[in-house]
Amino acid sequence: MARRKRIAAEPIPGAPRFTPKKAKNMLGVAKVVAPAVIPALAPVALRVFSEARDRMDRAKARRLGVPVEEIAQFSGKGGALHARLTGAARALAELRDRPGATEDDRTFARRSETTLEQLAAAVRAAERMPSSRRRAVHRAASTELDELEQRLLSRLGL
């Protein structure tokens, strides 16, 4: 047992020795150099962090299928579902307002917009629910939205 302690305490050949005196000297140098170096590095670090945040926002916007400017509207646990609801609402508006829209298309769009409003309200209400209930609400809303999107796509001829 004593042999192990002695071996562990021996320095590794070729490795620099780090002593309390060297640590004290390094702190003294850091106190002198840091005030000169940190202000020079701060703008660079700020640019790096800003660019990283911008890239993350663009990736999230691309994943949700929304413009980067609107990304803040789709935060929280139901953000992706809200983005889908918004996309479906825009598609319904296009269906209703397109030149060749029939009265049946307009009626479908009005009924579907009411459904979307109810789904959006349910998803907003679910934000403050316990996680198991929130997931159940999100699952139900997603299923309903899937069916609505299928009917919308068939009406658009896709």
Image (spheres, rainbow, N blue to C red):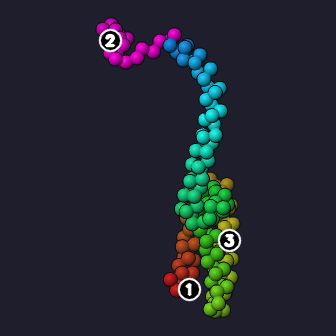
Quarter where residue 127 is shown = bottom right
Residue 136 visible in the picture? no
Q: Residue at x 56, y 53 (%)?
A: 56
Secondary structure beneath dot 1 equals helix
Q: Is residue 93 above or below residue 83?
A: below
Image coords of residue 84 (percent x, y): 59, 68
1 vs 3, front mark = 1
Q: Quadrant of residue 32?
A: top right
Three-letter amino acid code at disc 3? Answer: Gln
Q: Which residue is identified by label 3?
A: 118
Mark toward the start of the polypeptide (3 vs 2): 2
Q: Secondary structure at mark 2?
A: helix
Residue ID for mark 2: 7
Q: Nearer the viewer, residue 27 or 8?
A: 27
Q: State yes or no: discs 1 and 2 in contact (Cβ < 8 Å).
A: no
Question: Which residue position holds label 1?
Answer: 155
Mark 1 or mark 2, whichever is nearer to me: 2
Q: From the viewer's perspective, is residue 125 above or below residue 116? A: above
Please, what secondary structure does the residue beneath circle 3 have?
helix
Q: Please provide percent x and percent y for residue 1.
A: 31, 9
Q: Within the image, what quadrant is residue 38 found in?
A: top right
Residue 19: in magenta span:
yes
- Confirm whether the magenta stretch covers residue 128: no
Residues at marks 3 and 2, CA–CA distance in whole angstroms: 72 Å
Q: Residues within 10 Å of mark 2 (few under 14, many from 20)?
A: few
Say which label, 1 or 3, has the lower sequence index: 3
The residue depicted at 35 percent of the width and 11 percent of the height is: 10
Q: For the magenta stretch, what is the residue range?
A: 1-21
Q: Is residue 47 left or right of residue 13?
A: right
